[in-house]
Every structure is written in structure tokens, then in C-alpha cells.
Image: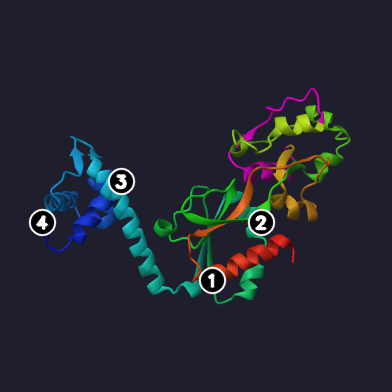
Amino acid sequence: MRPRHPVPLNALRAFEAAARSLSFQAAAGQLFVTPAAVSHQVKRLEEYLGVRLFHRGHRAVELTGAGKTLATSLGEVFGLLDLALDRAIAPASASLRVSAIESFAARWLAPRLHRFQHDHPELEVHVETSDSHADFTRDGVDVAIRYGVGGYPGVHAERFLEAPVFVVCAPALAADARFSLATPGDLRHHTLLQDRSALGRAGVPDWQAWLEAAGAEGVDAARGPVFASHYLALEAAVAGHGLALGLAPLVEQDLRQGRLFRPFDQSLANAYAFWIVRPQGDNGNPAVAAFCQWLRREASGQ
């Protein structure tokens, strides 16, 4: 192997930013330098490595095979470096970053979080929403809550909440004498609120599955407005605009406090569940340990 000069860190930073955005101009904005400076640093890195990292077009750049390989590795390296710096500035025991899907964060976590804060006033909890695969190194997230079948690669995932599915609506809608809800077949007179996020997910009950299980005939399972998330469909149900399929953990407080009503007993098992997701082998963060213990306690109703 030929001898090398010290690693050009500025050039690596410039390349990583340009590779992430596929734009020297965008990378320059992120690094507070000029596009020419980014281009110069990338050329310097190419000379240092002896390989070409970008195909340069008139108005665009494209990564070469070597560039793609290096970009992937650098993303992980700089993610770890940023995380290490964040933890040096704000120790892990002083803050906690939680990532959760929108519906879970709004309908399960937010109403309960004050209890965790009461027990751990020393922790500054940051809650953000996402349904994508949690990137603990790049995003700096400490723990994530995800909804799925599990099997998440490269992380530790713990199944902690089952999510059976049943019909819910506003109490006023159920009490409206003009439109009976005595049997599942009566749903043909009502608006069915559709949750687009449930469509096409094997093992996740949709309206067609629920109506068939309930023996409801003559009901168009596809009728009704389509919402991008379970959270939005439930908000429409609370507002009295129709009936939605609710995930048990996300509607339990609404049912208990009278914002939602369950008109039928029929419930379907769900292949998806809620999972606590953490970095693989990360057992040294006391804030994460405390939060996971609290989640389990809340899930068990203790």
C-alpha cells in the first residue's frame, strides 16, 4: 500500500455533503463556503485517493461506484462523530431523544409523558415523529417506537404493545336516531373513514376484513374519505365525521374519557404491533433504560 499524507478531513466533509445532496451548491450552503471551494476539496480528495468520485455533468453531478461506497461509509462515520460530540456537550443522562410514529406520539405517548417527567425531572425529553427506519447514528435518536412486524435489522427490537383492531366513532354519531348502528350491516348508511397507511400491509385488518368477519353485507368497504395516517382518521372520527378502525392502544384513552365509542364487539387480531427499538447492544445509557422500563410499566397498566 502506498504511503499517504494525513487524512484530508475538510475534503471528506465536503465530499460527504456533496454526495448527500448530489449538488456542490447545496453542499456549499451547508458548509458555509462557496461551490468552488467544495469542488476544489472534492478534487483534492480524488487526487488523494487516486479514484474518481463524481461524474460531472453540465448542471448535475452523479456518484461513481467508488463514490457511492465512500459516501455510505462516511455517512456512518460522521454520524458517529456528531453523536459523540453531542454526548460530550450534553451527557446522555441529561437528555433523551425519542422517535415515534405520529399516531403513537399523539394518542399514547403525549398523554402519559408527564408521568415519566414527574419521575425523572432531571431529564430533558425531546419527542419527534417519524415512521421510517430509525437511524440512531445519523439522527442522534436514543430510542424509537415503531409499528410493524419486527425483524428490524441492526437494532434491538422489543415487542411491547399488541394492536387489535375494532370500529370506533363519536358518541353523538352512535346516538343519532336518524342512522341506526344496531348491527354491522347498518354501516352502509354511514361514512367509513379510510386509513391509507393500513392499505397493502399483510396481516393489518382493513375495512373489508372487518366487515367480512362481522358478517356485514351490502356495505361498500372502499367508500369514504382517505386519510394519510391513522392519527388523521381517528381525529375525523372524534369530530363525528364517520367511523374509523381504531388500534386498541391508540383509542383506549378516548374510549375511557368519552371522546370515542365502540359500537360493536367485533375485534380482529393484528400482525403489526408496537415495538421499542434501540441501538444494538446499547445498555449503557441510564436515560434509555429508565424510559424503556417506564414504557413497559405503562403498557402493563401498572
The first of marks 3 and 2 along the sequence is: 3
Q: Which residue is mark 2?
A: 108
> In which quadrant of the rendered image does the C terminus lie?
bottom right
- Given residues 15 and 231, the one toward you in this image is 15
Q: Which residue is mark 3?
A: 21
Badge 1 local density, few (<14 within 10 Å), some, or many (20+)? many
Q: Amino acid at mark 3?
A: Ser
- Distance from label 2 to label 4 (Cα)? 57 Å
Q: Is residue 291 above or below residue 168?
A: below
Whether residue 290 sits left or right of residue 173 in the image: it is left
Query: Label 3 near label 1: C-beta < 8 Å?
Result: no
The first of marks 2 and 1 along the sequence is: 2
Q: Which residue is mark 4?
A: 2
Q: Is residue 224 above or below residue 163?
A: above
Query: Label 2 near label 3: C-beta < 8 Å?
Result: no
Q: Residue at x 61, y 34 (%)?
A: 199
Whether residue 178 sits left or right of residue 125 in the image: it is right
- Distance from label 3 to label 2 (Cα)? 35 Å
Task: Tell me the SS state at disc 2.
Answer: helix
Q: Amino acid at mark 1?
A: Ala
Label at residue 235:
none
Query: Disc 3 or disc 4, which is closer to the eye?
Result: 4
The first of marks 3 and 4 along the sequence is: 4
Task: Tell me the SS state at disc 3.
Answer: helix
In the picture as drawn, the residue positioned furthest to the front comes out as 1
The first of marks 2 and 4 along the sequence is: 4
Query: Label 4 near label 2: C-beta < 8 Å?
Result: no
Counting from the top left corner in percent of width and height, residue 265 is at 83, 42
Q: Amino acid at mark 4?
A: Arg
- Residue range in magenta is 215-241
